[in-house]
Image (tube, rainbow, N blue to C red):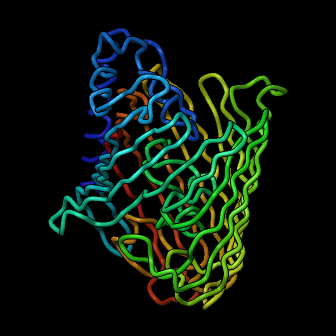
Amino acid sequence: MTHLRSHFLAGLALLGLLEGAAVARAGEQRPSSDPGQSAAIEAQPADGDAKENGFEDLWNVPTIYRGEDGGVLDELRIVGRLHLDNYVVESDVGDASDLVVRRARLGARARLLGNLEAHVETELDLEGGPLYSRLTDAYLAWRFSDAAQVKVGKHSVKFTLDGATSSNELLTIDRSNVANNFWFTDEYIPGVSVSGRSGAWSYNTGVFSGGRSNSEFGDFDGGYFWLGSLGRDFAQPLGVKKALLRADYVYNEPDADSDFTRSFQHIGSLAFILEAEGWGVSGDLVAGDGFLGQSDAMGVTVLPWMDLTSRLQLAGRYTYLNSDEANGLRLARYENAATSGRGDRYHELYAGLNYYIFGHRLKALTGLTYANMRDRANDGGAYDGWTWTTALRMSW
């Protein structure tokens, strides 16, 4: 446990230094912790005086053009993200540690004619391979009103609690193992979707290609899948900032060539997001019917959080997964560095601290995870171990 202890102390020391510097500046406006909010809203600075600390001016640099009202091109902006992880795994099946570039993306987004958006973004490999890795976003979106936006092209498929949340806005270092097992982790898939909101109601529906994946749009040679999502926000009757109850359903046509997706024909998710003043809790209940050897499975995750100061936040998570048959579940990302085997029952406990330097656009996170996987088949999937991860998240 020596490496784990040293990583723990280093992570706490880093957050302590950042919090001490913030107190010295005496900025006391807390950034929003809403994991589902848009980048435009999230642009509000963490300390309430961006002109003083320079972050707003710095984050405006990628906006290379902003036109006058009535023109064809309203705005052209360079967009991207850089996510760094340093992890240490100590388990009964082996240890692992590394400093990795978790995500590196760069692209451009143009807003035209008041309601049209064109977005192209690429994944970059900064760890020794070819620089270009894949195309993530490549779509056109037309906003008719708040109640209807049509998006065509390669874009994010949003279902499950964490799958519907941008990696920039997660309150934990990575998505839960529920999302890892049921959500389509390629995330960006060619399709057509319609989304919007009216009053307390919101929806999202679309049809996407499930064919063989490649670095661009895939081969369009497999099945398809359909996503339907409907939510209602009960914030007003409950007197809180947000109380969203959302149901997601995915029908995934069984096809051996559909490797954009997981091998579940039907996936259902019931997610709830509660945000009050300085605290909140989210939860997700997911179940899926497997095909092509994938067992039926279910999972649940609960994520409570609490603000300790205007910048420092405590977040926790419990995750439970169970599959009807052996080898129906995957381990989480860094647990897979110790063993790539599969099991049939999984428990996880996570506790972490988040430090918001400039809201979700620039933040540091550190967290400790305990996980246990049962493997009835006894073929290499059993796991019992700890993971400590410290991360930097930057997006623009």
Check the image and report above or below for 142 versus 259: above
Please identify the residue farthest to the left as the structure is shown: 128
Position of 169 compared to 287: left or right? left
Q: Nearer the viewer, residue 94 or 216?
A: 216
| Residue 208 on image: x %, y % | 60, 69
Check the image and report above or below for 276 versus 167: above
Q: Quadrant of the N terminus?
A: bottom left
The quarter holding residue 222 reads bottom right
What residue is drawn where x is 34% and y is 37%?
Answer: 77
Residue 122 visible in the snapshot: yes
What residue is drawn where x is 34% and y is 21%?
Answer: 56
| Residue 70 on image: x %, y % | 49, 26
Q: Looking at the image, how many numbered discs can be counted on the residues?
A: 0
| Residue 378 on image: x %, y % | 51, 89
Residue 4 visible in the snapshot: no
Position of 278 compared to 62: left or right? right
The quarter holding residue 232 reads top right
Q: Nearer the viewer, residue 142 or 146?
A: 142
The quarter holding residue 138 reads bottom left
Q: Nearer the viewer, residue 385 or 231?
A: 231
Q: Quadrant of the C terminus?
A: top left
| Residue 96 on image: x %, y % | 28, 66
Please identify the residue farthest to the right as the structure is shown: 237
What residue is drawn where x is 43% and y is 32%?
Answer: 74
What residue is drawn where x is 43% and y is 56%?
Answer: 137
